[in-house]
Image (cartoon, coloured by chain):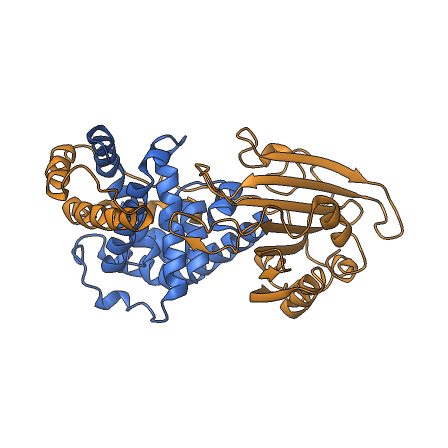
Amino acid sequence: MKSAQEDAYLEFVAARAKPLYRSAYVLAAGDTHLAEDLVQETLSRVYVHWNRVAGADSPAAYAQTVLVRSFLSLRRRRSTAERPVGNMPDSAASGPDTALRLALLDAVGQLPPRDRAVLLLRYWEDRSIEETAQMLKLSSSAVRSQGTRALGRVRALLGDSLSDLIPH
Amino acid sequence: MPFEADLAHALDRTTDSLEPDLTVFLSGAVARGRSRRRRRSAGIVAGVGACAVIAAAGLLIPGALAGTGSGGADMEPVALAMPRTAVTGTQMIHTLEQTFPGSRFSQVTAEGSNPSGPPSAYVATAELVVDDGHGAAFVGISAERLQLPLKVGEADGDGLSCASSPDHMTGGTCSLSQLPSSAAIPGGALVMWEENAADHPVGPVAAQRWTMTVTLKATGAQLQLVEWNSNGSMVGNDTSEPTRAAPPLSEQQAVAALTGATWAPILGAVG
């Protein structure tokens, strides 16, 4: 990679590493090791294809797609279940939002991986149904169905307690 | 505040304080990336050392980290109607396999519908990899019933308007047509056929996906068949490379299949 390209890549990483990590952290239901691995994997793939990524309409969206697909691919390969959130090595283990974080990640962790991805893309990142369908290789009706199901499950698990847990 | 807005806010709060170690990310990412490049094209070595990359990154970090999570989408109005009767996952698989006679199948999954469940249970789906001798292709189908009257040209992702077709402006194609009423499809049907790149940005060997959506105007029963010219696995950043040039079913074959005898029982059960 030429120096100018490397600089552009570095700028991209500096700008996008945190958003990617936040998404990875949610997908991994709080498993920081898995989240870090996913982000490294994503950034390495972006590095390999940097010329193409840099010319894309939205390099950030491209990286986000890589992240989500890497997560789903990894989940298919892994037979081991995730460790429970309570046992996570977690640098953000304490603080005013601890109860919220534990409850939320526990609920997200109970979703199947693809439902988790749909929830993230549709209800956190505001992706359209079509965008989400393309990113996850699903039909639009499957996205609607899984999104509604995922939201329903999280709502059933958290119920009214969610708003109570959010510090105001 | 609606639940989905609370959820988005909660996700923001939960991840706001995360401060990833950019040095770790970069060292790992660059090392992995270079390794991949070497495997892909022997002899190509990146120009700048990883240590220099990491050092430079340190200069870029302050103030450069942007947040994510824009507050959550409102839950889309689900334009689904209750299916007339349940369709099982086994029915979906069996019917999908019958659509590709003489083929071999793998990675088969399905989910049935449940009319007495919540709207999210109204959709029956099946997915598999079909090998018809021309290359493995990932295929998925869903069966559902839209609310009447059909909102032609308005709905988001309902297969009723090319306006919602992705990358419509970047080389993808979409066409919407109508089938006249017949014994097989009383009242006629709306037919939407799309061809899109499977990934963006489009690479030199990008896989394609083809989507055929058939919606019966009289009942709202809808089948949506999505075909890829790859086995559908996710190889790194992209869909795996194309295994074939064309989808297993052409536009004409797909519409014939979905409106023919094979899928008639499913359409009848849905609508």
In the image, B243: left or right of A19?
Answer: right
Q: What x and y, as percent, mark residue A35?
A: 27, 55
Q: What x and y, as percent, mark residue B42?
A: 28, 47
Using the image, determine if residue A138 lies above or below residue A47. below
- Quarter placement of the C terminus of chain A: top left
- Quarter placement of the N terminus of chain A: top left
Q: Which chain is orange?
A: B
Q: What x and y, as percent, mark residue A27?
A: 35, 55
Identify the colour of chain A in the image.
blue
Residue B69, quarter of the rendered image: top left
Q: Residue furthest right?
A: B183
B135 or B141: nearer the viewer: B135
In the image, A112: left or right of A141?
Answer: left
> Does the rendering let one see residue B220?
no
Residue A11, quarter of the rendered image: top left
Report the residue at 53% width, 34% height from top: B167
Report the residue at 44% width, 54% height from top: B234
Using the image, determine if residue B192 lies above or below residue B108. above
Q: What x and y, as percent, mark residue B11?
A: 32, 49
Q: How many marks?
A: 0
Residue B96, quarter of the rendered image: bottom right
In the image, A158: left or right of B162?
Answer: left
> Does the rendering let one see residue B166?
yes
A125 or A139: nearer the viewer: A139
